[in-house]
Amino acid sequence: MQQYEKPIRVGVVGVGRGKGFARGAGPHLGMELVALCDTWEERLNELGKELSVATYTDYDKFLEHDIDAVILANYFHEHAPFAIKALDAGKHVMSETSACFTLAQGVELVEAVERSGRIYMFAENYPYMVFNQEMRRLYQAGHIGEFKYGEGEYVHPMSAEESARISPGMDHWRNWIPATYYCTHSLAPLMYITDTWPVKVNGFVIAHDPEDETHFGKTVRRSDLASMIAVRMDNGAVVKLLKGSLRGHGVWVRVHGNKGLMENLRFGDTHMVRVRREPFDKDTGEPVERVYLPDFPEHHAEAMKAGHGGGDFFMNYHFAEAIRRNEQPFLDVYRGVAMSIIGVLAYRSALDDSAPVVVPDFRDIEVRRQYADDHWSPAPWDRGPGQPWPSILGDMRPSNRGIEFASKIWRDSGYTG
């Protein structure tokens, strides 16, 4: 094990998803977990006792603790305000998806990172799954030529019981987030593999269906079933993103270049990579097609023990390395915001008959100024003139049956909010 002179003192916000980050922030990475923060006191105290660290229900008090870095695993729509407050307090930040919930938040977050001089990492773990790391290696070596077309799928249906269990409360973000918003698991691997950026987007939404008992009839969900997003990248390539609760669970990435194709398998061991080069493109003696299980390029043993196909290990690893080098990571604030606002802009497109929408480049100060007051939001507490409903069909209210079903599961889980 590598020895580190001084550990990076870390605090984690959110003890649900944050458990993995908290348990992974150890001496093997030169990190030391010292504090946790959450408003669900029972779960907070349990994890705090297990890990022997300080616990806080007040975020401001938490930031006063002697910590160097904050890992945000709180709610989807809250990351930017929490990150900005931590950056302004002089802390490095790693933030779960999404980086921002509105374009105005994206502007504010970028500028907070720039003025703070601190490290910001977007905690998108899907690029670091073993097959995506292998496809990046192949692409960067020129094996399939220039990127022309790609597909990213994150299809994740759940039972009504599971959906209610992880979404406690009528206004929990999972119960109203528009179908396009959770798009970074689909887009991030393609940006990571090819190092391209999104420039234009069209959004298509598969609407809320009250006849679907599992996803709507027995839940309090007010948003739609799924979305397909078409993205034009800065090198001219076209990308299709599919995400949502369609039947047929799977995570799949496909990349077509002008000299070949690569993808992870859809069946069997989905961590395996398929690479195809046509007879007229391949070298002499090279097979037309290969299917194989790659290793992680580094830290294979450690990554194999981590969640999300090993991706969770590399979040803490790259965050710690960026802090020690004092260099922003690949998944920096600019990429994190670009990936995140795709979901917002795709929903605008879907509400406008899927018309194309330009993706602003927030690396440009002048461009940022145009969006500094763009607070367009589907959040229930932001209702007002010009604000969208969570569903493209409008105000879709849960049935009494759905409310009763979900409420029982919340009570059984210990949720009293």
Image: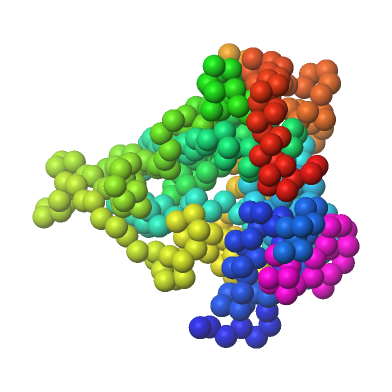
Q: Does the magenta stretch include residue 363?
A: no
Q: In this view, does 193 lie to the left or right of 411?
A: left
Residue at image point 68% right, 44% down: 412
The magenta segment is 47-66
Residue 411 visible in the picture: yes
Taking 310 as reference, is 363 above or below it? above
| Closer-to-camera residue (359/154) | 154
Q: Quadrant of residue 295?
A: bottom left
Q: Quadrant of residue 51?
A: bottom right
Give residue 26's position: percent from left, percent from top.
61, 74
Q: In this view, does 412 lie to the left or right of 87?
A: left
Give residue 360's position: percent from left, percent from top.
65, 34
Give the tally of numbered discs: 0
Residue 341 visible in the picture: no
Q: Is residue 349 left or right of residue 307?
A: right
| Closer-to-camera residue (233/93) | 93
Q: Residue furthest left?
A: 285
How is this picture coloured? rainbow
Give residue 413's position: percent from left, percent from top.
68, 47
Give residue 414's position: percent from left, percent from top.
73, 48
In the rendered view of the protein, which quadrant contains the C terminus?
Answer: top right
Residue at image point 50% right, 50% down: 126
| Closer-to-camera residue (72/281) | 72
Residue at image point 84% right, 21% down: 384
Residue at image point 75% right, 60% down: 44
| Closer-to-camera residue (182/398) | 398
